[in-house]
Image (spheres, coloured by chain):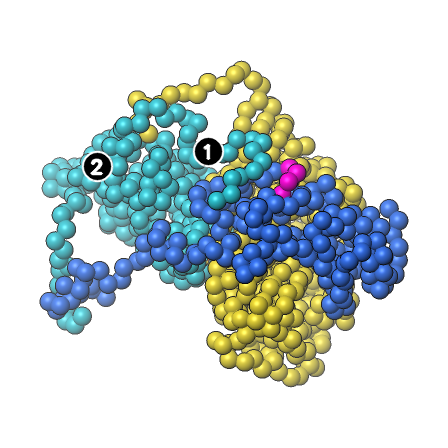
Chain colours: A cyan, B yellow, C blue
């Protein structure tokens, strides 16, 4: 594209991502929000979950050589207290389930960064039956880092970018999960089967945070409502009963 | 799930409970899970649960050309990728009848030993962290980073080098690299006493690690334990010496052993192996400048490269133990079957389950790290 | 355990003497290839372990041969004393795809048999544990079978990144585009 003017990208898709009452906010609330965003961007806790090979570059990033902590990023062991979920590489279907569980347990506002080409388009495992090819179909992603094993410098850069984004109030991918929960759930169900569900009541959370949009509920969340008999022992993946020795051959 | 749908499950009253240890847990090495049944803090039963890092390597390798697989293999074990490249390349060389030039053999030994030091330093860190010594982790990881810098200089990449290819190595060493390596080895050696003071001779560590996860020599043999874990039980077996490859027969090195077979012994063996690797690297530094010649044998057009039919089993001593590749070719441009035998396939599943069943909750992380189990190798 | 010392030649003699109809080939300095009828395999492993010191089961590999409708199972055993790796090759028919477990001879077989069961669908009778390990979320056929086409599966299951969506083409036709 030439010239400096921006040509808007036009789509005829219905507008589903409504920015939550930006105009209606009172001035004081805006100031408070900006201040909160500013503070948030200065103290990011990263969930300690190594989903793929990119995680091997995290210890150098955290420890003395590159030292993330000087910019206010530090690891955290539980999802409830973490702000940032790093998807450090390829996700097998089995891990993706755990990632979605962890993601839903995190408190909003929460941010997701995808590491490496595997999270973007499947990377070098493009023909593997076990790994998912696009992370953003299943959970909303704020930033990606390119590269097959991103270097610590790249990881630091993405932290700085993310901090700037949060400070400017633009890291809003998590709202998308609430606004379009039905579509995300639908894609998760396509992959995991129709009885996929998580212990988190995302619809109620969406109401709580005030991010209910046209896409929050739909046919897939209706499926969730239909089942009245779910209990803890069907969450989320059945471990096969002990002692089963043989599997029927296909 | 909607709260109104929630139905609590009732269990019969019991003193036992189940705990899902991992995959999202800082005490787990990598992405792996263990389901433990506990009574108080005594583990009654442990069931390993893998597959979180499954990528179907063996399947997708059948879909790619022989040379393309060079890019795939290092990803099988993330902390110690070089032995994977070596093992795969050697299997292809054995099948295709390729002769590796002398200079390339020495360079390969150098890469393998550097990778071993890196992996051991990383494990020091992990091991220390499970006992609560974070300083040691910081030291280990940053020391390893200096080696990664050298790797980057040689190969262009920090972690996955794809440097060892069938028939040799990708290119020769940069100018002056051996001097920098020698300086780094001196540096590392001068810092090891600090590790010693802070960690290995620390009473807390010794008390904590003595008797944790003990494997007797008979058990080690019966359970298929290999590598440093086997040597920690007093059995001096090492693929580098028993089934030598490359130029290892020309090198002088010891195979350190310990008697006790517990977590402390396994750490001590790794520490001694770092010293042995330094010794080997010094010999390489002394010999390599006198060995001239190409670093790669001539290869046919890699895009139309058919390997003669046959099968072979190549073995390498990685930092975790015996690594094997069973490769079958039917004379085509792609492998017919590649089977990876990673040492952690034993350590992280059967051995870990058995050791944990004798241990306590607080030892789980320590036992896992002291075995240096590498989950991506199990899952492939 | 009595271990008879000697070079691979005496190993060959011992094996051939004890198990008739066996073919032993020497491949390289420390490699032996043994082709054996499947029924004799447990006896062979016992013999190798008990009398010749091959105590370490290095791996069990499975190879799928659709042309002959067979699975090839390869048992790699290593002797620490003789420094020799013996690979015993057997074939089993793909249907019904059953074989006996050697767990009682070599404990490590537990993991490999479980793995082969999962990836190829071979059933090992008497194996202590054939529960799914890696593929607990998997509903399809055993993925390592040659008849399973991973590309097809990937195309059906996952969506690729669409770098040229239709709406972008329309925008580009009007002279616009994505800001670089
Ligand atoms: S992008 Fe590369 S380094 Fe990252 S997970 Fe994928 S293969 Fe591993």
Identify which residue is drawn at 11% across, 38% down: A24
Numbered-mark total: 2
Binning the other alpha carbons within 10 Å of mark 1 as few (below 14), some (14 to 19) or many (20 upward) gives few
Q: Nearer the viewer, residue B8 or B333?
A: B333
Q: Is residue B119 left or right of residue A101?
A: right
Dot 1: element: loop
Asked if the residue at tag 1 contacts the one at tag 2, i.e. Cβ–Cβ closer than 8 Å, the answer is no
Identify which residue is drawn at 29% across, 31% down: A224
Q: Nearer the viewer, residue C131 or A75?
A: C131
Indicate which disc residue B258 carries.
Answer: none
Figure quarter occupied by ligand 1: bottom left
- Whether the residue carrying mark 2 lies under 8 Å from ligand 1 is answered with no
Give the mark nearest the N terminus, 2 or 1.
Answer: 2
Q: Is residue C105 visible?
A: yes
- Whether the residue carrying mark 1 lies under 8 Å from ligand 1 is answered with no
Query: In the orientation shown, which residue stands out farthest toward the bottom?
Result: B293
Q: Is residue A40 visible?
A: no
Q: Which residue is mark 1?
A: A238
Q: Please give the chain letter of the residue carrying mark 2.
A: A
Q: Which residues are magenta?
A: C124-128
């Amino acid at each position: 594209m030439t010239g400096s003017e921006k040509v808007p990208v036009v789509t005829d898709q219905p507008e589903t991502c409504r920015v939550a009452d930006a105009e209606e906010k009172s001035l004081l609330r805006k100031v408070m929000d900006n201040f909160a965003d500013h503070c948030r961007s200065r103290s990011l806790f990263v969930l300690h979950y190594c989903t793929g090979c990119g995680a091997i570059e995290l210890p150098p990033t955290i420890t003395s050589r590159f030292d993330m902590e000087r910019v206010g990023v530090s690891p955290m062991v539980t999802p409830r207290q973490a702000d940032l979920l790093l998807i450090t590489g390829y996700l097998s279907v089995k891990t993706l389930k755990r990632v979605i569980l962890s993601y839903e347990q995190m408190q909003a506002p929460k941010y997701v960064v995808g590491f490496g080409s595997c999270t973007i388009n499947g990377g070098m495992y493009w023909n593997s039956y076990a790994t998912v090819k696009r992370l953003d179909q299943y959970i909303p992603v704020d930033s990606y880092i390119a590269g097959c094993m991103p270097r610590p410098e790249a990881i630091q850069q993405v932290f700085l970018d993310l901090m700037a984004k949060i400070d400017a109030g633009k890291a809003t991918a998590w709202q998308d999960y609430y606004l379009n929960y039905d579509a995300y759930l639908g894609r998760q169900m396509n992959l995991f089967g129709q009885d996929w569900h998580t212990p988190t009541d995302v619809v109620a959370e969406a109401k709580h945070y005030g991010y209910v949009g046209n896409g929050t509920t739909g046919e897939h969340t209706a499926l969730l409502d239909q089942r009245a008999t779910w209990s803890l022992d069907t969450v989320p993946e059945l471990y096969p009963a002990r002692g089963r020795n043989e599997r029927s051959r296909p | 799930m909607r709260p109104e749908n929630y139905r609590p499950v009732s269990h019969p009253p019991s003193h036992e409970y189940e705990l899902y240890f991992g995959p999202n847990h800082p005490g787990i090495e990598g992405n792996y899970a263990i389901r433990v049944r506990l009574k108080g803090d005594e583990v009654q039963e442990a069931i390993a649960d893998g597959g979180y890092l499954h990528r179907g390597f063996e399947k997708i390798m059948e879909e790619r050309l022989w040379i393309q697989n060079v890019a795939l293999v290092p990803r099988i074990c993330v902390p110690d990728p070089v032995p994977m490249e070596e093992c795969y390349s050697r299997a292809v060389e054995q099948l295709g009848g390729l002769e590796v030039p002398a200079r390339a053999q020495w360079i390969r030994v150098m890469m393998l030993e550097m990778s071993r030091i890196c992996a051991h330093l990383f494990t020091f860190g992990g091991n220390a962290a499970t006992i609560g010594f974070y300083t040691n982790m910081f030291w280990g990881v940053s020391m390893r980073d200096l080696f990664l810098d050298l790797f980057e200089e040689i190969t262009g990449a920090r972690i996955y080098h794809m440097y060892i290819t069938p028939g040799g190595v990708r290119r020769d060493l940069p100018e002056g690299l051996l001097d920098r390596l020698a300086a780094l080895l001196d540096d590392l050696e001068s810092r090891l006493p600090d590790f010693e003071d802070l960690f290995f001779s620390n009473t807390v560590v010794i008390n904590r690690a003595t008797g944790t996860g003990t494997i007797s020599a008979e058990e080690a043999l019966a359970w298929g334990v290999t590598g440093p874990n086997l040597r920690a039980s007093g059995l001096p077996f090492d693929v580098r010496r028993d089934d030598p490859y490359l130029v290892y027969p020309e090198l002088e090195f010891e195979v350190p052993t310990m008697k006790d077979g517990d977590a402390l012994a396994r750490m001590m063996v790794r520490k001694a192996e770092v010293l042995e690797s330094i010794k080997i690297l010094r010999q390489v530094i002394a010999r390599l400048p006198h060995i001239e010649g190409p670093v790669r044998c001539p290869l046919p057009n890699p895009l139309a490269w058919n390997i003669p039919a046959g099968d072979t089993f190549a073995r390498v001593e990685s930092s975790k133990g015996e690594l094997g590749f069973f490769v079958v070719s039917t004379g085509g441009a792609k492998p017919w079957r590649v089977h990876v035998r990673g040492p952690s396939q034993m350590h992280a599943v059967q051995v870990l389950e058995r050791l944990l069943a004798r241990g306590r909750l607080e030892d789980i992380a320590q036992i896992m790290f002291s075995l240096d189990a590498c989950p991506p190798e199990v899952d492939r | 355990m009595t271990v008879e010392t000697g070079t691979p030649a005496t190993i060959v003699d011992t094996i051939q003497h004890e198990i008739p109809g066996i073919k032993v080939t020497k491949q390289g300095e420390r490699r032996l290839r043994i082709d054996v009828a499947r029924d004799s395999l447990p006896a062979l492993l016992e013999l190798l372990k008990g009398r010749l010191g091959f105590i370490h089961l290095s791996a069990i590999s499975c190879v799928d041969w659709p042309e002959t409708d067979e699975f090839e199972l390869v048992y790699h055993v290593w002797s620490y004393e003789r420094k020799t790796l013996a690979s015993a090759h057997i074939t089993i028919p793909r249907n019904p795809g059953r074989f006996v477990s050697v767990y009682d001879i070599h404990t490590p077989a537990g993991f490999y048999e479980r793995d082969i069961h999962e990836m190829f669908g071979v059933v090992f009778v008497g194996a202590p544990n054939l529960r799914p390990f890696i593929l607990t979320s998997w509903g399809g056929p055993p993925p390592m079978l040659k008849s399973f086409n991973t590309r097809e599966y990937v195309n059906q299951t996952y969506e690729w990144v669409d770098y040229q969506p239709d709406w972008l083409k329309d925008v580009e036709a009007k002279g616009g585009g994505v800001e670089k």
